[in-house]
Image: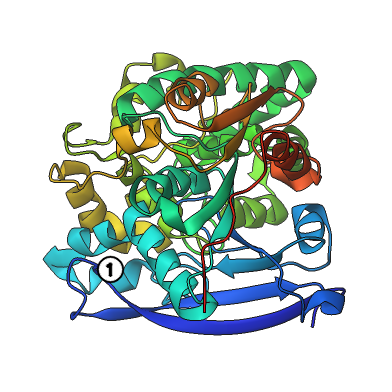
C-alpha cells in the first residue's frame, strides 16, 4: 500500500527481439495502482507511457497530480519500458559484454518493441481489454507507433508534449531545437544577469582540464553545458541558478557541494539509456543513418563553442563525447556508434493508418517546448485522424505534473464523444 493507493506488482516474460520469439527473453515489470475503495470495481484501464527514451515509470510517493485524477476513474497500469526500472535493466557493462552485437542489442529497445511488450501485458494480464494511454514526451513516440501497429488495443490516447515529426528526421529536430536552447539560455541570463559572470568563471576553470568530479571523471566545459537540458522544465532556471550560486568556495576553487551536484545531474546513473538511445528514436528506413545529427548541427553553430562567452548551454542533444567524458556511458560507445551508422531501420509509423485513425487522440502541445518542436507536432497532428490538440504556453515540457493537463485532454475527448468502448474480454 501507498497512501491512498493499493499496489499490485507482477512481471511477464517477452522476447528480446520480437522478430525471433523463440530466442532470448527478458522480463517486463508491471505495477498496478487502484483506489483502495474501488479495488473490486470493473474500472477502465489507463496505462502510462513514460518519457525518455530509457525512462522507468514513476514511483509515486503520494496520491497527487495526474495519478490522483486518474485513480478517480481508472485502474492505472505502470509498465517499466524494457531495459529500465525492474524490466531487466541494462547498463553500459551489459552492452559492452555484447561486443560487436551491442548495436543490434540496443536496436531492440525502440518503440515497436515497447508496443509489443504492452500488447503482451494487455493480453496476458488483462484478458485483452482495451485500455487508454497517457503519454509524456517520448511516450508520444510510443503512442504513434501504437496507433500504427496495434490500434485495436486502445480506447483513447492522451499525449503531453510528445508528438514526433513524421517522418522523423533527427537533423531537422536539432536544427530547430538548437535555436530554442539559445533562446532559453538568453532568457536565463536576463532573469539572472549575475549568473553570466559566474558561469563564465566556472567555464574558465573547467577549461584548464584539472577539475575532477567525486567519481573520478574530469568535468569538461561541454559536460557542464549539458546542464541546460533543465531549461525546458519548470523551475529549471531556478535550479541552475541555485546550483551555480555556491559554485566557488574560495578564489577559483570549486566547492565540493557544487561538484557533487553536477556529477549527480550529469552522470547518467539513473537513466543510462537516455543519451544512449536519444538519436535512434529518429531512425527510419528512408532516412538513412542518424549520423550523430546533434553533433553535426553543433559544429555549424560556433556560438555554442566552449570558449565563447557568454557561455551557451545545450539541451536534449546526444553527443559522441558523452561516451568518453562520462564514466557510466563509456561501455556504450561502440554500440552507440553502430546505431549512428545504422541504415536498415524498421518503420515505426504507418502514415496511411495514422491518416485513417479512429482512436480518439488528444495532445497538449507546449508552444515554447524546448525539446519537442511545436511546429513539427502540429504538422503531424494535421495528418492524424480523430486527433485534437490544445496549444498552450502556460506550461513547459513537464506540464503533465500540474494535475490540470490530463483534465484538459480528457475534456477534449469527452466533448467529441468519449473514449471507445472496451473490446470483449474474458
In the image, taking residue 343 as reference, residue 66 lies left or right, namely right
Give the mark count: 1
411 over 39 or under it: above or below: above
Q: Quadrant of the N terminus?
A: bottom right
Q: Which residue lies at the image location 30% right of the left edge and 63% below the top edge?
A: 331
307 over 21 or under it: above or below: above
Q: Residues within 10 Å of mark 1 (few under 14, many from 20)?
A: many
In the image, taking residue 315 as reference, residue 98 lies left or right, namely left
99 over 166 or under it: above or below: below
Q: Position of residue 87 (x, y in %)?
A: 46, 75
Q: Give the image's coloring scheme.
A: rainbow
Asked if residue 232 can be seen in this view, the reply is yes
Check disc 1 and report the residue beneath it.
Answer: 95
Q: Position of residue 274 (x, y in %)?
A: 45, 52
Q: Which residue lies at the image location 51% right of the left edge and 22% below the top edge?
A: 378
Quadrant position of residue 71:
bottom right
Amino acid at each position: 500500500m501507498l497512501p491512498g493507493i493499493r499496489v499490485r506488482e507482477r512481471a511477464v516474460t517477452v522476447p528480446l527481439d520480437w522478430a525471433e520469439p523463440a530466442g532470448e527473453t527478458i522480463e517486463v515489470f508491471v505495477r498496478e495502482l487502484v483506489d483502495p475503495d474501488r479495488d473490486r470495481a470493473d474500472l477502465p484501464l489507463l496505462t502510462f507511457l513514460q518519457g525518455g527514451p530509457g525512462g522507468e515509470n514513476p514511483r509515486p510517493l503520494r496520491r497527487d497530480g495526474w495519478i490522483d485524477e486518474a485513480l478517480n476513474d481508472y485502474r492505472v497500469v505502470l509498465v517499466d519500458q524494457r531495459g529500465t526500472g525492474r524490466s531487466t535493466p541494462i547498463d553500459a557493462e551489459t552492452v559492452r559484454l555484447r561486443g560487436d552485437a551491442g548495436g543490434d542489442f540496443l536496436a531492440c529497445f525502440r518503440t515497436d518493441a515497447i508496443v509489443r511488450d504492452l500488447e503482451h501485458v494487455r493480453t496476458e494480464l488483462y484478458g485483452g481489454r482495451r485500455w487508454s494511454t497517457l503519454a509524456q514526451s517520448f511516450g508520444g513516440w510510443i503512442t504513434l507507433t501504437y496507433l500504427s501497429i496495434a490500434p485495436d488495443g486502445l480506447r483513447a490516447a492522451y499525449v503531453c508534449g510528445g508528438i514526433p515529426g513524421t517522418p522523423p528526421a533527427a537533423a531537422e529536430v536539432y536544427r530547430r531545437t538548437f535555436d530554442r536552447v539559445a533562446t532559453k539560455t538568453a532568457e536565463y541570463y536576463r532573469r539572472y544577469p549575475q549568473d553570466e559572470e559566474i558561469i563564465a568563471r566556472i567555464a574558465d576553470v573547467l577549461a584548464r582540464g584539472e577539475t575532477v568530479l567525486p567519481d573520478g571523471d574530469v568535468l569538461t566545459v561541454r559536460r557542464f553545458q549539458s546542464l541546460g537540458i533543465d531549461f525546458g522544465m519548470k523551475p529549471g532556471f531556478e535550479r541552475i541558478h541555485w546550483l551555480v550560486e555556491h559554485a566557488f568556495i574560495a578564489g577559483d576553487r570549486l566547492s565540493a557541494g557544487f561538484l557533487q551536484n553536477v556529477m549527480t545531474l550529469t552522470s547518467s546513473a539513473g537513466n543510462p539509456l537516455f543519451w544512449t538511445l536519444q538519436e535512434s528514436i529518429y531512425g527510419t528506413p528512408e532516412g538513412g543513418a542518424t549520423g550523430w545529427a546533434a553533433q553535426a548541427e553543433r559544429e555549424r553553430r560556433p556560438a555554442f563553442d566552449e570558449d565563447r562567452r557568454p557561455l551557451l548551454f545545450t539541451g536534449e542533444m546526444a553527443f559522441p563525447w558523452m561516451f568518453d567524458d562520462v564514466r557510466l556511458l563509456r561501455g556504450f560507445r561502440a554500440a552507440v556508434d553502430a546505431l549512428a551508422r545504422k541504415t536498415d531501420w524498421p518503420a515505426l509509423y504507418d502514415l496511411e493508418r495514422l491518416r485513417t485513425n479512429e482512436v480518439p487522440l488528444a495532445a497538449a502541445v507546449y508552444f515554447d517546448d524546448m525539446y519537442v518542436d511545436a511546429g513539427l507536432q502540429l504538422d503531424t497532428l494535421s495528418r492524424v485522424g480523430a486527433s485534437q490538440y490544445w496549444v498552450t504556453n502556460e506550461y513547459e515540457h513537464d506540464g503533465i505534473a500540474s494535475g490540470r493537463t490530463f483534465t484538459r485532454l480528457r475534456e477534449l475527448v469527452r466533448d467529441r464523444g468519449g473514449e471507445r468502448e472496451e473490446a470483449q474480454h474474458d
